[in-house]
Image (spheres, helix red, strand yellow):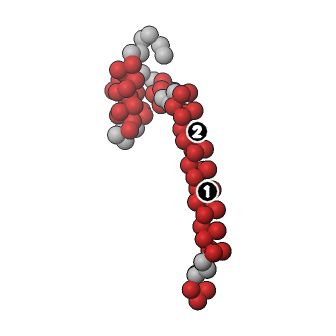
């Protein structure tokens, strides 16, 4: 991050963008270029956050697989009545 753009300015830009303000308006209001706002938004996710999210996705994918296996096993053990399902 540039020393000329404090963290508070970046946080305000993110807040305005999340509220739905166009990037051009956010940039004009804060006195920075639209490219700077886009760069801030793009780099807003830290590497640690991304790694944590990927790990959680892996956990959830394994959980879904396990649930599908349990459902398949239950269907074999107890088929639906009348075969309607």
Which residue extends farthest front?
77
- Residue 54 image label: 2
Cα separation between marks 1 and 2: 18 Å
Residue 82, label in figure: none
In this rendering, does residue 70 appear at all? yes
**Which of the marked residues, 1 or 2, is nearer the chain's N terminus?**
2
Q: Residue at x 58, y 39 (%)?
A: 54
> What residue is pinned by disc 1?
66
Rendered-image quadrant of the C terminus: bottom right
Could you say where residue 8 lies in the image, as x and y percent from the top left? 35, 20
Q: Is residue 63 above or below residue 5?
A: below
Farthest top residue in view: 3
- Say whether residue 6 is left or right of residue 54: left
Taking the spot 63% from the left edge, 56% from the top edge, the residue there is: 65
* Mark 1 and mark 2 residues within 8 Å of each other at the beta carbon: no
Q: Secondary structure at mark 2?
A: helix
Front residue of 52 and 12: 52
Judged left or right of residue 78, residue 29 is left
Question: In the rendered image of this protein, does residue 19 appear above or below residue 48?
Answer: below
Nearer-the-camera pick, 32 or 67: 67
Q: Nearer the viewer, mark 1 or mark 2?
A: 1
Residue 41 on image: x %, y %? 47, 31
- Find the residue positioned furthest to the bottom: 82
Residue 77, given in percent of the width and then of the height, sits at: 63, 75
Instruction: Judge by depth and name the residue closer to the eye, 59 or 21.
Output: 59
User: Going 37% across and 41% down the picture, which residue do you hit?
Assistant: 20
Tally the marks: 2
The residue located at (56%, 86%) in the rendering is 81
């Amino acid at each position: 991050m540039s020393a000329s753009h404090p963290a508070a300015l970046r946080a305000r830009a993110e807040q305005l963008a999340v509220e739905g303000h166009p990037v051009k308006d956010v940039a004009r209001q804060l006195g920075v270029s639209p490219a700077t706002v886009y760069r801030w938004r793009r780099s807003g996710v830290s590497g640690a956050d991304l790694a944590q999210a990927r790990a959680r996705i892996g956990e959830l994918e394994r959980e879904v697989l396990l649930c599908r296996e349990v459902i398949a096993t239950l269907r074999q053990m107890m088929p639906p009545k009348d075969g309607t399902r």
